[in-house]
Image: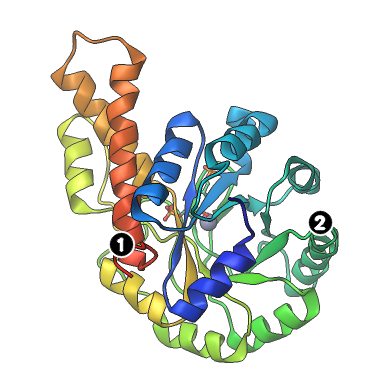
Amino acid sequence: MLVSNKTIQKKAEQRRYGVGAFNVYDMESVQSVVRAAELERSPAIIATSEGAISYAGHEFLAELIELATRKKKVQFTMHLDHGQDMDIIRKCLKLGYTSVMIDASKYDFKKNIRITRQVVQLAHKKGVSVEAELGTIGGVEDSVSARKILLTEPEDAKEFVAHTGCDTLAVAIGTSHGAYKFAGSSRLDIMRLRQIKKTVKVPLVLHGASGIPDWIVKKAKLFGAVLGKPHGVSDKDIRAAISGGISKINIDSDLRLTFDATIREVLKKRPEIFDPRKILGPARDAMTDMVRYKMRLFGSSGKTR
Ligand code: G3H
Ligand code: 13P
Ligand code: ZN
């Protein structure tokens, strides 16, 4: 069943857990998230970035998600991650997305408000909820980049939500996208998060939340990946963020690393195979396990609640 982020996050807030938003690109990643959600009896947000849309094709990806989630008992969202292009946002509304994110955080405060409000007006006509971003989340990926990190100011957040009417808000409290988030150990500004939560009424979102577990980095390196010294958000900090008011947690890099490490292992250990299903199948299983782990960590799993 497809619902909106607002619906999923409101419930999560009331019951004090976080819902994972997992980035997908293809059949394997979509099936991993859906399978994990069914096994854990957990809600899940299925996120497509503009990069994923251009890779897979917008109609194709939307149909794939619709088909994969149809008649399922658990709740899913079809969500646009870091939307920046108005044409893509309009197309999401036509294709049956239930949530869109407008990321105008690279603009100044007033322009961010103006663009976000425009998207809210469009989306609300269709009953689609809107996530906006205030402050910047660092790191660089295909189409999402921010060189300088500006943490979210609680009073600005209050004014921003009042002026835009956004349904949920992504806040910057020290995370960044990708595998290289911290020079040393994980550090989030939980005090700031608590202040934002006090001043803002809408549910909050944490981007750049991958944990980059040591074991998966070691495995990827063992089978040939060239990685520097990646560091992610610790499980302890994720729990602190949820208790500080975060109800949506964005995960992409952990799934990318899981996919990469598994494919490398299969190819290295079984050089004789060349059937794509025997290569991609284990990666799909490994991503399912990773998503299940996150659902338990976030407290959204019906098995642990
Ligand atoms: O936050 C961004 C997501 O991880 C998507 O990255 O633009 O490389 O698909 P992408
Ligand atoms: P990670 O790079 O930490 O997985 O963050 C993903 C994200 O924020 C997607 O919007
Ligand atoms: Zn993000």
Q: Which residue is label 2 attached to?
A: 126
Dot in front, 2 or 1:
1
Marks 2 and 1, the one that precedes in the sequence: 2
Position of 260 with respect to 150 (left or right) is left
Q: Residues within 10 Å of mark 2 (few under 14, many from 20)?
A: few
Q: Nearer the viewer, residue 98 or 232?
A: 98
Residue at (79, 64) in percent of width and height: 120
Residue 34 seen anywhere in this rendered image of the structure: yes
Question: Is 97 situated above or below 160?
Answer: above
Residue type, label 1: Lys
Q: Nearer the viewer, residue 18 or 135?
A: 18
The quarter holding residue 165 reads: bottom right
Residue type, label 2: Lys
Residue at (47, 50) in percent of width and height: 22
Q: Position of residue 290 (x, y in %)?
A: 30, 48
Position of 265 with respect to 135 (left or right) is left
Q: Which residue is label 1 attached to?
A: 303
